[in-house]
Amino acid sequence: MAIEGSKEEAASGRIRLGMVGGGQGAFIGAVHRIASRIDDQYELVAGALSSEPARAKASAKDLGIADDRAYGSFAEMAKAEAARPDGIEAVAIVTPNHMHAPAAKAFLDAGIHVICDKPLTTTVAEAEELVALAKKSGKVFAVTHNYTGYPMIRQARAMVAAGELGTIRLVQAEYPQDWLTEKAEATGSKQAEWRTDPKRSGAGGCIGDIGTHAYNLACFVTGLELDELLAQLSTFVEGRLLDDDVEILLRWKGGARGMLWASQVAVGHENGLKLRVYGTKGGLEWTQADPNYLWFTKFGQPKQLLTRGGAGAWPEAARVTRVPSGHPEGYLEGFATIYAEAARAIRAAREGKAVDADVIYPSVEDGLIGMKFIDAAVKSSQAGNVWTKV
Amino acid sequence: MAIEGSKEEAASGRIRLGMVGGGQGAFIGAVHRIASRIDDQYELVAGALSSEPARAKASAKDLGIADDRAYGSFAEMAKAEAARPDGIEAVAIVTPNHMHAPAAKAFLDAGIHVICDKPLTTTVAEAEELVALAKKSGKVFAVTHNYTGYPMIRQARAMVAAGELGTIRLVQAEYPQDWLTEKAEATGSKQAEWRTDPKRSGAGGCIGDIGTHAYNLACFVTGLELDELLAQLSTFVEGRLLDDDVEILLRWKGGARGMLWASQVAVGHENGLKLRVYGTKGGLEWTQADPNYLWFTKFGQPKQLLTRGGAGAWPEAARVTRVPSGHPEGYLEGFATIYAEAARAIRAAREGKAVDADVIYPSVEDGLIGMKFIDAAVKSSQAGNVWTKV
Amino acid sequence: MAIEGSKEEAASGRIRLGMVGGGQGAFIGAVHRIASRIDDQYELVAGALSSEPARAKASAKDLGIADDRAYGSFAEMAKAEAARPDGIEAVAIVTPNHMHAPAAKAFLDAGIHVICDKPLTTTVAEAEELVALAKKSGKVFAVTHNYTGYPMIRQARAMVAAGELGTIRLVQAEYPQDWLTEKAEATGSKQAEWRTDPKRSGAGGCIGDIGTHAYNLACFVTGLELDELLAQLSTFVEGRLLDDDVEILLRWKGGARGMLWASQVAVGHENGLKLRVYGTKGGLEWTQADPNYLWFTKFGQPKQLLTRGGAGAWPEAARVTRVPSGHPEGYLEGFATIYAEAARAIRAAREGKAVDADVIYPSVEDGLIGMKFIDAAVKSSQAGNVWTKV
Amino acid sequence: MAIEGSKEEAASGRIRLGMVGGGQGAFIGAVHRIASRIDDQYELVAGALSSEPARAKASAKDLGIADDRAYGSFAEMAKAEAARPDGIEAVAIVTPNHMHAPAAKAFLDAGIHVICDKPLTTTVAEAEELVALAKKSGKVFAVTHNYTGYPMIRQARAMVAAGELGTIRLVQAEYPQDWLTEKAEATGSKQAEWRTDPKRSGAGGCIGDIGTHAYNLACFVTGLELDELLAQLSTFVEGRLLDDDVEILLRWKGGARGMLWASQVAVGHENGLKLRVYGTKGGLEWTQADPNYLWFTKFGQPKQLLTRGGAGAWPEAARVTRVPSGHPEGYLEGFATIYAEAARAIRAAREGKAVDADVIYPSVEDGLIGMKFIDAAVKSSQAGNVWTKV
C-alpha cells in the first residue's frame, strides 16, 4: 500500500498535464481529472476543453486553469505548449472517439506524452498510424482501459500467469447496461447522442463503447490472444444508428473458447461488467460493481472469496491498493492507478531510465487490439455471423 | 399455500405408482421418490428398478415394494400391472436416456400414465413417436423439467405473460457445472459413464443433460418459441465422447435474441442454472441455487428482490408454495410440484374431468421441443457453427 | 447422501404416527406431515387435529385418516390408540404451546413416543415434569428445534467440536421477522392471536416463539452452556400482551460472550435467523434463508464459502444431505431430518437396541433448556435488565 | 454529480492546508491527503508530520512540502503559519488520539480551521473544552467521522427524516473487525500499539476506535439522541490493556431501542460496519464494505435495492456522488466528501458568508457526543453493566 509518490517523485515535482475535451457537461473529463489527482502525480495546467471556444474558456476558468493556457483547439494547444519552457509534459484526450486520432497525432508530433480514452480511434487504420507514430516518438501512450487498474484484476492476471487456473479453457465476459433501453439520443442526452452517432463513435456502438472494455479485460487477465470471433450485433431501439447489443462467440489461440455479451438495453444493469475464467485446475469470477472481491475456486476445493488487501491478496494487488481490506476502493481509484502507472513511465522518460518492470498500463498497442476487435465484430455480423479473424 | 391434497383427493386415495430404473446406486430415482411423497399424492407399489434382475429385486426390497411387484424388466411390469385390478396408474421412468422411449411406449400401450425424466428420448424421431402415441392414448405424459416447478419461476412466467417486462428483447440462459472438469467417466463414476456415452445419452452430452434444462426454462418463462440457433459444441476433456461445453446464439420468433451457455467443465459451479430476461419495460433474473429470490427491475425504477411467499409474490407462485417466506424451499419441493401437478391431471383423468386450467407441467410436447433443440445444436455445430432452424 | 430408508427399515415397515393439532387453518401441522413423509419413515394413521370436534373430523378426512381414528381429543386418542394392536407408535404434537405438556404427558403415559413442537411447554415446572416423565418412560421425546437439521448446521457443529475455530469467544445470534410490525392479532390472523396470547404462549412472546430457536441453535453449534443473561424485552405495538422484540447479552460458561436479538417488528426480515461464532482461530456465519452455505474463515486465511455437498462438506453434513451440491435443500428437508433422526431412535427402541451414536435430535432436555432461557430472559427484563442465571 | 469545484471556488484558489501527524509509517494520514485532493479544494503546504523531528522532515520531503514549512512540532507550526501571509487556512490533525486536543487548541488559538480525526479527544473534559474554544473562535471544526460521507448514508438519513420509515423503533449497529484477534501489539504493529495503549488512545480501545464510528453513524442516520446505554466491554486477548470487544444495549430518547456491537477479534470481518434501522413503516440496511447499496423495505412491499446514482437515488445522495451508478465509489470518496463539505464551510468563512444549508459535516459537537458515548460505555461496564445516561 504505497501509492503516494516517493521522495524522488516529490522532489522532481508533479507532471504538468493538459486536457483535450472534458469541458462543461462532459462526464469522463472529470473522472480523468480526479484520477490524475488522487496520487498527486499530475497538475492540470492547460486545456482545450471544448470544441466551442467560449465553452472551452469558461470550462478552463472553472478548473483554475490560467487564461493564457485555455485554448480554443487542441492544435493551438499542442503548438503553444510545446513552445513554453513550462509546457505540459502529458495530455489527456477525453473527447468523443473521432477526435482521438487527430489530437493524439498533434501531441505526439509536439513531443508530448499521451493519455487517451478508449476506444483508441474510429478505424483500424488510424489506430495503426498512432501505433507507428507513438513508436517513432518514443513517448508514453496510455489508453484508459481503466478496469485493468482494479487491484483484484491485477491479482486475477497474476494468478492466471502463475498457473493457478491451469490451462485456460473458457472465458466468459459480459458488460450489460440499460441506459439506452429507450431512445435517449432523441431526448436530449448528450452522452447518448455522440455514442450512437457513427460519425463520432465509429462503426461500433455498444461494441465500441463497452464491448471493447470487456474484451480488453479478458485479454488482460488471461494473457490470451484472440484468434477469431463470430458476432451478432443487434439494434433493438428503432431508428438507432448503431448496435445496442452484441453477442459474440470467441476462439482464442491455444484452444480456449468463450462468449462475450455487451448490451445497452438489458434492464436492471447499471455497469454490469463481469469476467469469468475457467481452466483445467481452477476458476475465477470478478464483477466490476463489487470490485474488491475475487471469487476463486481450485477444482475440488471450497470456493474462496479473496478480498483486496485481505489474507489472500497477492503482491500484484497490494502494489496498487491504497486503503486496508474491508474499506472499499472503487472506480476512481482503479482509474487513478492507470494515471499513476503512466506517471511512472513518464517520470522514467523524464530521466531517461527504463520503466520499472512492474509498471502496467494499457498501451497504444492495446488500443489497436481493441480496434481490430471492433472491426472484426462489425464485419462478422455484417457477413451473416461468420467466423472472422481479428 | 395449499399443496397438501384436498378432501376429495384424500377420499379417492393415493395414485398407485410404479418406477422404472432408480435402483441401488442411482441418483435421480431417489429424487423422484421423495418428490412423489412430499404432497402425499402417490404410493410407490411396483418397480423394475434395474436392468439387472438381482439388483432390481434387492432395490425393491429396500423400498418396501412387495416381492411380487418387483419386476425384472419394464415390459414384464407393464404387462403384469395392467392386468391387476390394483395395478399401477402411473409410472415414473428414471433410466438413462436410451431407455425412455421403449419404456414409455410399453406403459402408454398398457394404458398407464407416464412421468418421464428428461431428455425425453435420444432422437427426434422417437420423441415424435411418443408424442403421437401419447395423444392417441389420452394418457397424462409429464416430463420432469423440474425447474419449472420452482415458485419464483412460475411467478417469472406470469409476470412476462402479464406484460410486466414489455416486449422481450433478450434471453440469457446458462447452466455451468464443474463435475466433468476431469475425466470422471474413466475413474468409476457411474453417473459420468452413462452421461458421456453416446449409446445411452444420445448425440448430445452437456447439451442434452443440462443445456436442454436451460432451454426449457427459457421457453417456459418467456413463452417464446425459438426460430433458429447457432451452436458451438466443445469437448475439452481429451478422449471424452460427447460435448462438455455448449455455447449457442439464439434467435426467437418475434425478434428476441439471446445466448445459452452450458458447461460441465466450469470450475467453481455446482448447478449454476441462471436465467435472465430483458424486455422493453423491465428485466428479471433468477438463479437455481437461490431459488426463493427473483430479481425484478422495472425500467427507471429501483431493483426489487421478490421473495417466494413475500410481499411481491403473485398467485401463480403462491399456488405452488408450501412454507412461508423466509423459510427456503429447494430442489425437491420444485420437483414435487411437477409430481403434484401431474397428480391433478391424473386424478382428472380418473374422473373423466377436464384438468383445471391452472395446472402446469412439462408435457411430452415439451420433451419433443427439447429433442429438436439438441438435434439442431448438434447439427449447427457439426456444420461449422451456422444458423439452424429448430 | 443416503437418507432414504435402509432394507432393514423397509422390512420393518413405516412408523405409525398420530398427530395432535394441525387441523384446517393451522400452519405448522402441514410442515410436520411433509417432514414425516420425505424420508418415508412414517405413516400418519390417527389424529386429534383440532380442539373443536367437528373440525377435527373434517381435517382427518382431508388427510385420509380413517374415521375411527379421527379423535375429538388427545386424551381419547392416547387411550384408544394404546389399546389397538396397530396403534400409533409415535405422536406429533403441533398445538399452541399451552397444550404441549398435557398432551405429551398423556402419550408418554400411554407408552407412545413423542415428537413435540417448541417451545416445549409454557413453564419451566411443566418442562421439568416432562423430562422426568420421559426419562421414566424410556420413550423417545424429540422437540422440533428444526434448524438443527440443516446440513451446514451439522457441519458447523462438527467444525467447532473439532477445534477448527479454536476456543470460542463470541456467539452472535439473531432472528428478526417483521410479521407483527402492525397489530395482526387484532385483524384476524389466527397465528398472531395465539402467539401473542400469554394463556396459550406462556410468559414469552417473541422470546418463546423465535428467540428460543436462536438460542437453541447457538447451543447446538457451539456446544457451550449458557451461564447467565441480561435481557431487555420490549413491546413496541401498543396493546400487545407479550414482547415483540428481545435484546439479550450472553455470558457462556468458560468465558465466551455474545448477544442475541429476536424481533417480530424488524421490517424487511422474513425469517432472518442468523448465527455467527468467533473463536481464537476461526469464525463462521450461517443464515437460515440461504441454508446451503456456510461461511468459514480461518484467521489469516481467505474466507471460504462451504456448500452443502460441495468440496468442503464434512461427513456430518453429508449424512443428512439428500441432493447434490448446487441443488438447494430447504426448510422442509431440515425439518425432515429431525423426523428421520427420531425415526432411527424409535426403530432402535422397537428392536431394543441402542441408538446409533451419530443420531442427533433435539431432546426433551433441550426443550427444558429452552424453557429456562425464556424464564430467565423474562425475569431479567422484569427485574430491570440485570444478569440472571439460567 | 457536481463535486468538482465551481467557477467561484476555482477563482478563489485552493485552501492552504497543513497536517499534524501522518508521517512515514502512518496509515490515516495518507487517507486524509488523498481525500483532500480528490475534489481539488485543498493544497497541502505545511506539516508537522511526526513527533520525531527527523522523521517529520523526511516525511515532508516525500510529500513535496517546502523545507521551511516542515515543522518539528505542531506548536511551532501553528505559530509560524499564523505569522505568514500565505499561511495555512486549515489543519488536518491525524495523530494518535491523545494529541488531538492540544493540537486542536493550538490551531484554534492561531485562528486556523481544524479538521480532526476521531475520537475527538481522550476525555470528555477535553472535548468540552474544544467545543467551547471552537465556538469562541468561530472557526470551522470538522471531525472525520468519514462514514457520514457515503452517498447512501446521506440518502438513508434523508429517508428517515422524510418519514419513509415511520417512527423509529430499533437501531442495530455493528462494527466487527478481526485484526486484533492475536496480540498484534506485541509483534511490532505500530497501529496496534497505540490503539491498545490507554495513554495514547484514552480509556476506550475498541469502543473508541470503532464503536464510536458505529454510534456516530446510527445518530447521523436516525437523527435520534441516545438517552442511556448498558455496556459490556471485554478484553479477550490476554494482557491487552484495553477492551477489544464491546456489546451495548441502547435506549434512545423517544422510545427506540437497539444494540451496538463492535469487535476487533471477530474472525472473518475486515471492516464490517453495518447499520440497520427499523421503524413503524419501513426498514433499511447498509454495509460499509458494499457502500453503493442501500436496502429498503416498505412494510408490506417487496424489498428494494437502492443504488448510488440509480433510479431510487435521492438528491441528498446525488449531491455527493462523483461517478454514475454501477461504477462503485469507495472509502476514499466518502472521506473526500467530508473534506469537500468542510471546504464549503471554510470558503464561506473566508467570504464572511453563511454556510449553505445543505452542507453537512461532523462537527466538534458530534465529536463531544462521541466522547460522552465512550465515557458512558466504560462507566457502565465498570459498574457491572448497568444503565448509564450519556
Image: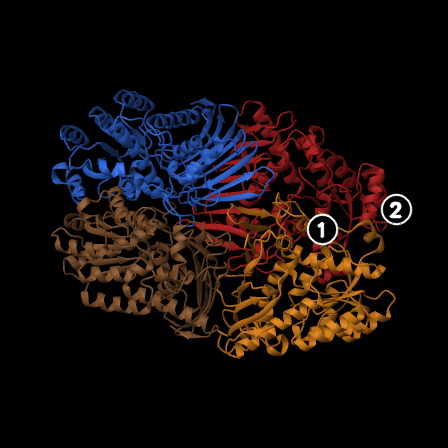
Chain colours: A blue, B red, C orange, D brown
Protein chain holding label 1: B
Between residue C278 and residue A390, name the one nearer to us. Answer: C278
Labels 2 and 1 positioned on one and the same chain: yes
Instruction: Examine the rendering and report whether any part of residue C119 can be seen.
Output: no
Mark 2, Cα crowd under 10 Å, few <14 / some 14-19 / many 20+, is few
Q: Total number of numbered labels?
A: 2
Taking A310 as reference, is C275 above or below it? below
Q: Earlier in the sequence, mark 2 or mark 1?
A: 1
Which residue is under mark 2? B68
Mark 2: which secondary structure? Answer: helix
Where is residue D222, by image quadrant? Answer: bottom left
What residue sits 34% from the left and 54% below the top?
Answer: D151
Q: Could you tell me residue B15's position as x and y percent? A: 76, 52
> In the image, which is nearer the foreground, mark 2 or mark 1?
1
Q: Could you tell me residue B275's position as x and y percent? A: 53, 43
**Circle 2: residue type:** Asp
Mark 1, Cα crowd under 10 Å, few <14 / some 14-19 / many 20+, is many
Does residue C181 appear left or right of residue A352 in this picture? Answer: right
What residue sits 28% from the left and 32% below the top?
Answer: A115
What residue sits 56% from the left and 76% below the top?
Answer: C378
Q: CA distance from mark 2 to mark 1?
A: 23 Å
**Circle 1: residue type:** Ile
Taking D218 as reference, is B160 above or below it? above
Q: Could you tell me residue C343's position as x and y percent? A: 76, 59
Where is residue C123, by image quadrant? Answer: bottom right
Quarter of the C terminus of chain C within the rendering? bottom right
Instruction: Examine the rendering and report whether any part of residue B27 can be seen.
Output: yes
Mark 1: which secondary structure? Answer: helix
Protein chain holding label 2: B
Which residue is under mark 1? B34
Taking C336 as reference, is C115 above or below it? below
Does residue C292 appear left or right of residue B159 in this picture? Answer: right
